[in-house]
Image (cartoon, rainbow, N blue to C red):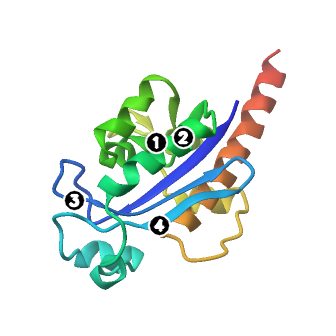
Amino acid sequence: MKTLFLDLETTGLNSDGKDEILEVAIVDEDGNVLINTLVKPLNKTEWPEAQAIHGISPEMVADAPSMDELQWIILNLIVEHATDEVVIYNAAYDWAFMPPMIQGIGTYIEIECAMESFAEYNGLWDSKRNNWKRQKLSFAAEHFNHVWNSEAHRALADTLALKTVWQGLASWRLNKEFVSE
């Protein structure tokens, strides 16, 4: 099975079209960077709250390609790499920002949520949500001894951390299966 890891940075938390993608990174299972680019939003001109978290300013994306320009590139990367799954930390959130054309590939490949998998692995119950307690990527990455080569909350750094988490979870799943046999 081939796996790709994807992360986005956005102008805010609303995936209803009001907020937009500012950065996208995709890394393969060997750690090769397939894409790492800033994205120029089509409608938003400022995002001070999000900028305070990820540091991406309007000036930084002024000359970046738009998601309209990038969507074919991203789709082709996923198809070209014969991907069986795309892993995202908080997949429901990030995947909702992707253009419908890219979302449609979810019919043919698995979109896996590392946040949900880590929540189950971590084993803390959230009685408010009646589900496993979600943790931030930084917490999960630290648990699996990820070494940050750059700042968290940038797409490439987060994608590499996600890869570490997913590989740690894969080892846990193998041990879990081995013990239950």
Q: Earlier in the sequence, mark 4 or mark 2?
A: 4
Residue 75: image location, x then y, percent: 46, 42
For residue 77, side relative to residue 60 (left or right): right
Label 4 and label 1: CA atoms lie apart by: 15 Å
Eye-nearest disc, 3 or 4: 4
Residue 67: image location, x then y, percent: 33, 56
Q: Do residues under tags 2 and 1 come within 8 Å of each other at their CB atoms?
A: yes
Q: Which residue is mark 2?
A: 78
| Rendering quarter of residue 141 | bottom right
Nearest the eye: 90 or 101: 101
| Rendering quarter of residue 91 | top left
- Circle 2 Cα neighbour tier, 10 Å, few/some/many (<14 / 14–19 / ≥20): many
Q: Earlier in the sequence, mark 3 or mark 1?
A: 3
| Circle 3: element type | loop
As drawn, 85 above or below 45: above
For residue 126, side relative to residue 48 (left or right): right
Q: Earlier in the sequence, mark 4 or mark 1?
A: 4
Q: Which residue is mark 4?
A: 37
Label 2 and label 1: CA atoms lie apart by: 5 Å
